[in-house]
Amino acid sequence: LKHAWLDCRRRAQAPMASISVDRTLPKPQDHASDGLDAVGFVQFWGNSPALDLLGDGQAAAFGVAAAGVTPGQQHSKEDKMTGEQFWSREVVDAGDAGAEVHQAVEPAPLPEEGPLNILVAGGADIRHLVKTVARRRGGGGRGPRLRFFLHESNHEVLARHILFLQVVNNTALPARERMEIFLSLYGNTLVRERDSRYVAELADEFVELVTDNSSHPLASAINMDGLKFKDRDILQDVFKGWRADVPFDIEALREQRSRGYYRDRYDFRKNMMDWDYQTHIKDKAGIINWFHYKAFCFTGVAFETRLASYNTSNRTLASYTEAKDRAKGTTVQVRGYWGDLINSPYWAFSIATNAQDRPRLFKVSGAQYRETETDIAEFNLTDYIGQLDTGEELHLPAETPEEHTFPYTSPMEGLRQERKVEEVEESKEQPAPQGGGRARGRRKPAKEWPPLTPAFEGDGVEVVLLSGDLREVLRKSKYRGLFHRGFLGAMAAMPFFEDAGLNRAAEDPFRHPESAPAARIRKPARKEKPELLGARRDDSAFAAVFAEGAEVVAETMKYQAHFDAQQRLAFRHRVAQAGHLFGWRLADEARAVPRMEHDMKERRAQELEKYATDFLRF
């Protein structure tokens, strides 16, 4: 009877199966990617603001990073709510004491003697290094020697670190020219022809730098002892690929990537770009202009600092990834553009600035920002480079009445005019070389390099390059208790989770057994499992390398444009759980890891992520 009943049930359901979803239809992945195809395999720029790792209020920032400032300071609408207003209305758990909600976890004072060791893992660029050194130079330039340990999984990113260190230290060029070259090579797939020549002329010298045969002053600041010979060989190949005679059609390669990401929606990709901008970018950083973001998604050109033709491939964005040969089925290395397609390079220098100039640079008129993200990046990077040279901070010129009347003159215009006049005066004051009039237009010999900036040469900065398995690198005894400050980028998250055992279900103490009901509310690790504080400190490579009282800043996915808000919140909780197992105390816990409900709507998750902290600080 049982078998007969089941047979009747199958027959009754057969007509329903024929009118339900057709199983032969293509899968959703055949129409559009889930977003990971757009992220790529190599992260060439960071997705968070630049930090002074010795002490920066930006690390504790929460809420909207690039909130606009209206002339009348009118923020009556709910979507203009500040971070303080949002968290003041949030319901706090009954078990929380007022002092614990926004607990202050202060790091130990920095040592006055000996080098200050700073670990930057997965930073993707040198934005933190540049800002940290510039701020110290601007604050007097005195103190212990700074040693930055930069770890990257991709050698192409390490090669770009060396390039940008040379750009900011090229004292033969004025600060504005260095800024333009930096931004062009940093975030543009297509650059000016002079920028391409600049890179090609340095390629051979960088090859010599890797082999310890270079006379460049940068050789005294960069330490490659932490790299294996295999890593050095790969770096040489990367630099050789920057030569002008090496073909690299980045337009065709990026077009190929875009078609692989958008697929059937390729002809309507503008609508998808608009969705990403409206959903993930505009509310958090309205200073990023929609037309500029759209241009980046279409062409890959993010920064156009002056009227010029951006039509030459940026060879520094060339990279390799593993693939399978279609004919033989063997693993091969494929050269192409494997960077990001939808996460723009604006986050590093464009969404924050100093408190004195911020009201004028982030002013809003008629729901439109008067300045753009490129203007902010120009101002910030010129300020950092200027501090490396002179130790003086850059500020906007005095306010003029034209800034308050239509068509609202930009305060950056006066700054640009001042810089133009300054550059002309400097060129006139240069003494003529000795040896007669014929030497007047003679260029310097190829091996004669200008000195480094005073911030690197006089104040003492050493950059140690690291590569390979991050956990294996940190397990070396020489790194035990060495670092006073640390930054963990999103690209270093997987080794971080592996070190805590969170990537293995059997060893994950926060994973609920299948027999037990799932938690309806996910709370911070300190509240959910307080007994696990420091449970894996002794076995952790990450916990062992930091000195007592060190501060570690972890990057979140707040400014990513391809993950849902619930996934971003879950990532925050996962990082906090790993830090809890290492015995690290999380600062500003309530705003860093908001509690998650099992039936939370996406809109609610977006609101929490929007007003949460930019970083997790331990």
Image: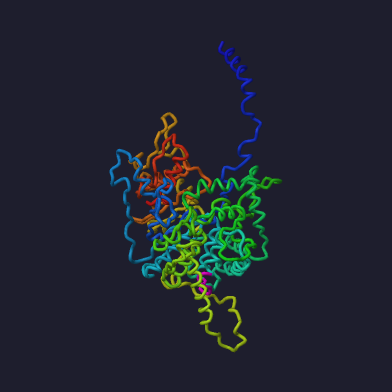
Asked if 333 appears above or below 458 in the picture, the reply is above
Residue 584: tell me if it is visible. Answer: no
Q: How many marks?
A: 0
Q: Position of residue 611 (x, y in %)?
A: 41, 47
List the single residue furthest toward the right.
327
List the single residue furthest toward the bottom.
436
Q: Position of residue 30 (x, y in %)?
A: 63, 39
Magenta span dominant secondary structure: loop
Q: 503 and 469: which one is in front?
A: 503
Q: Is residue 330 left or right of residue 549?
A: right
Q: 300 and 110: which one is in front?
A: 300
> Colour scheme in the image?
rainbow
Residue 374 magenta-highlighted: no
Q: 507 and 99: which one is in front?
A: 99
Asked if 115 appears above or below 599 in the picture, the reply is below
Query: Which quadrant holds residue 436?
Result: bottom right
Q: Residue at x 39, y 58 (%)?
A: 485
List the single residue furthest toward the top.
1
Q: Quadrant of the N terminus?
A: top right
Q: Is residue 332 left or right of residue 502?
A: right
Q: Is residue 231 left or right of residue 554?
A: right
Q: Position of residue 365 (x, y in %)?
A: 47, 56
The residue range painted magenta reads 170-176
Residue 43: tell me if it is visible. Answer: yes
Q: Position of residue 91 (x, y in %)?
A: 34, 40
Q: 252 and 503: which one is in front?
A: 252
